[in-house]
């Protein structure tokens, strides 16, 4: 089993190598309140509530470990989405109709047929009751998921590292709805599906969590962070993107720029001569 110290070291290395503005987030899902570290902050015990995405922001920007359960979480849809509360499909539909997220009740029922029947019902049966999050370089828990926020350039480096060998295990499969992006897509789905997920921060992220306009994120099963570090900046060998970002500005460029370009030019020229 990978130790907490190994995760802390990997978190600091990822932060340093990518020049991230905030720490990667270590996320763990719990089935019993006894799993919450003694030093973790529970908002409800401080007399207030907090959403999961706010806890992620606090951890990555200001440090500290946060524990969120349904009692702590004012964002009730995410409590349901994580299976912390046993709620019926009709109750779920009614809550969303009142929100007005979709055009009409029929549209919300179409959404529910996907979200509830295929996801929530199965997740409820898993028995999770909360989430604990820490800045990865200072984590108090062995994480299930690592969630890293950055700009488009930094996400490109992470995607390149995950796809360096094009193994299906590390492949990214993401869909987008504009809701539950950080909490569900960035944290819970990588844990449940064992697949990395791209996060385009959604309504809650932007309303509650202080997400910056330029920020995107990627969530991955926690152990994948070691694979990412192993492959960081290897794409393209010496030609690949590096830090600082190499951007080619000269005008008089040709296909001799890279071996791959040159080879493809030779193939293209050969085919053109055959026409």
Image (cartoon, grey):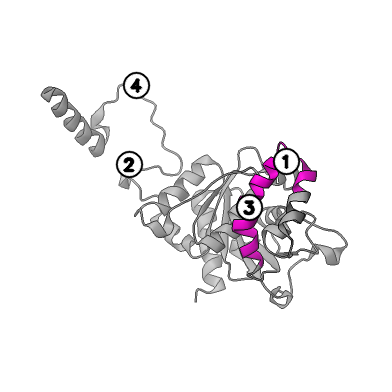
Left or right: where 55 falls relative to 264: right
Circle 2 sits in a helix, a strand or a loop, which is it?
Answer: helix
Q: SS of the residue at dot 3?
A: helix
In the picture, the disc for residue 239 is: 2
Report the magenta stretch's main SS.
helix
**Quadrant of the drawing holding the C terminus:** top left
Q: Which label number is shown at residue 179?
A: none
Q: Residues within 10 Å of mark 1 (few under 14, many from 20)?
A: few
Mark 4 falls on what kind of element?
loop
Q: Is mark 1 on a helix, strand or loop?
A: loop
Whichever of labels 1 and 4 marks the residue nearer the N terminus, that label is 1
Residue 167: give x, y in percent of width and height: 36, 57
Q: Which residue lies under the disc numbered 1?
A: 101
Local crowd size for mark 4, using a 10 Å CA cut-off: few (<14), some (14–19), many (≥20)? few
Say which of 38 and 243 sits in front: 38
Q: In the rendered view, does 77 fall on the left or right side of 200? A: right
Q: Residue furthest front?
A: 106
Q: Name the residue under label 4.
A: 251
Instruction: Give the residue displayed 54% in from the left and 46% down from the top.
Output: 175
Q: How far apart are marks 3 and 2 (CA)?
A: 43 Å
Badge nearest the viewer, 3 or 4 = 3
**Closer to the camera: disc 1 or disc 2?**
1
């Amino acid at each position: 089993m990978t130790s907490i110290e190994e995760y802390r070291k990997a978190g600091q290395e990822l932060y340093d190598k990518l020049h991230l503005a905030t720490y990667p987030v270590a996320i763990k899902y719990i089935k019993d309140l006894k799993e919450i570290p003694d030093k973790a902050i529970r908002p409800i015990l401080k007399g207030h509530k907090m959403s999961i995405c706010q806890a992620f922001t606090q951890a990555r920007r200001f440090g500290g470990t946060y524990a969120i359960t349904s009692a702590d979480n004012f964002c009730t849809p995410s409590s349901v989405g994580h299976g912390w509360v046993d709620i019926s499909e009709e109750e779920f539909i009614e809550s969303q109709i009142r929100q007005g997220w979709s055009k009409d009740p029929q549209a919300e029922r179409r959404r529910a047929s996907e979200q509830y029947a295929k996801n929530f019902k199965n997740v409820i049966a898993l028995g999770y009751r909360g989430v604990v999050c820490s800045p990865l370089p200072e984590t108090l828990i062995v994480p299930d998921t690592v969630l890293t926020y950055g700009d488009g350039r930094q996400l490109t480096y992470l995607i390149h590292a995950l796809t360096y060998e094009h193994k299906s295990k590390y492949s990214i499969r993401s869909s987008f709805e504009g809701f539950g992006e950080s909490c569900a897509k960035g944290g819970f789905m990588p844990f449940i599906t064992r697949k990395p997920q791209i996060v385009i921060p959604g309504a809650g992220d932007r309303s509650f969590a202080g997400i910056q306009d330029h920020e995107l994120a990627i969530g991955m099963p926690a152990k994948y962070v070691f694979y990412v570090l192993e492959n960081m900046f290897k794409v393209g060998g010496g030609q690949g993107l590096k830090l600082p970002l190499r951007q080619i500005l000269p005008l008089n460029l040709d296909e001799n720029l890279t071996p791959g370009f040159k080879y493809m030019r030779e193939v293209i020229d050969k085919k053109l001569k055959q026409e």
